[in-house]
Amino acid sequence: MIPRYSRPDMVAIWEPETRFRIWFEIEAHATQKLADLGVVPQAAAKALWDWWATNPAIDVAAIDAIEAVTKHDVIAFLDWVAAQVGPEARFMHQGMTSSDVLDTCLAVQLARAADLLLADLDALLAAIRRRAHEHKYTPTMGRSHGIHAEPTSFGVKLAQAYAEFARNRARLVAARADIATCAISGAVGTFANVDPRVEEHVAQQLGLSVEPVSTQVIPRDRHAMFFATLGVIASSIERLATEIRHLQRTEVLEAEEYFSPGQKGSSAMPHKRNPVLTENLTGLARLVRGFVTPALENVALWHERDISHSSVERMIGPDATVTLDFALVRLTQVVDKLLIYPDRMEKNLGRMGGLIHSQRVLLALTQAGVSRDGAYRLVQRNAMQVWQADGALNLLDLLKADAEVTAHLPAAQLETLFDLGYHLRHVDTIFARVFG
């Protein structure tokens, strides 16, 4: 995490003090249930909660100093809390193992991170929806392989992005539910020294579900799916960012990032207006996807527990969520202020002398009795003339002058096949499917 690509709310989830506060809540809730079950004195739970009620500052430096000696973070934390609370603190952690605290804490942190990301997605979806309706019927060039294909609308382009991010939101909701599990099952996960009811109580207090079988750690397939979902969202960010980058190219210039007063695009060339935000988003997406493979490799642990996953998660948990949070907010800002140029879209639609209507002519010829191959040949030989003339010729004019074509399609009928509006006649259907 670096400040340049971080937002405070997400960073706060991963701060050491936040982590230690979650650890305490796990330990205190577990001790409370143990007291209710008669395993430890009620005074032990009361001492913990009484101290907590004073809203004490967590001395991260002091805990780190203890860990420097013990070489164990959970023990260092327990020792520090015991020094603050007093003798009753000896009943903390009864029957528990470190993973009970670490894994349950990570579940809380990832669930909180997911909540922020879901809010980010909601804001992005709202921005895309607004701009899509704004340009619902704005005709623009549809491209395949980067080449002019057939007309579409800019609203349809954005509707596609909306549908994709709506799917991503549903995926993240499922991933959040999958990751938000609690394990308080003790060494190797058998509950030998801690009653399963303790786990149920802690889970309920922290808004988690109970892990059905946790060995000594929560199974890492859950985490793999969570980070894979983040990777898919990042790829969708890159897809929309790449589209905007292409549309901003000088030769296209159908849309571009907002260029603020006083902004400068190049240290050397004063005329430059570069797609720096969407290029940045492309790079951030690569980072988030890079965290997916380590998460997948964490699934295979030795027997009931090892810590080969630990160092990975200490890094990818904060880095993936902080980076994606920043990227989603940045993309929302790009979409919200995107400069869109319908006049340039119209100009590009006419750039290649009507070639974009070739399929309608092909289909009309087949309906007039020409074989498909024959119809393709007739249209293509005229279309290639327009292509080679770089749009200086007009396909409709060439077709009208082609006796083989007009033998099947009179000039008046040919003219009807070059109607731009024809291509937008089902926009309402698409929008109804996407937006309801």
Image: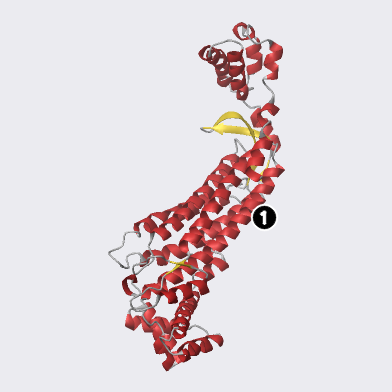
Residue 114 in sight here: yes
The x, y position of residue 352, in whole percent, is 61, 24
Of residues 242 and 299, the one nearer the viewer is 299
Q: Does the rendering let one see residue 266?
A: no
**Above/below status of 161 relative to 427:** below
Above or below, comparing residue 112 to residue 284 in the picture: below
Q: In which quadrant of the rendered image does the C terminus lie?
A: top right
> Residue 134 appears in which quarter of the rendering?
top right
* Residue under numbered circle 1: 262
Image spot of residue 356 (x, y percent): 61, 25
Which one is nearer the viewer's eye here, 198 or 345? 198
**Observer-nearest of 340 and 408:** 408
Question: Measured from the top left, where is residue 205 in percent x and y?
Answer: 52, 74
100 vs 208, left or right, is left
**Count of residue discs:** 1
Percent coordinates x, y for residue 281 in the rendering: 53, 52
At x 59% / y 22%, what residue is drawn?
359
Q: Is residue 161 left or right of residue 289?
A: right
Mark 1: few/some/many CA within 10 Å (<14, 14-19, 20+): few
Scheme by which the image is coloured:
secondary structure
In percent of the image, x 41 and y 82: which residue is there?
77
**Residue in the image at 60% along x and 14% along y:** 367
Task: Please say if 2 is above or below 246.
Answer: below
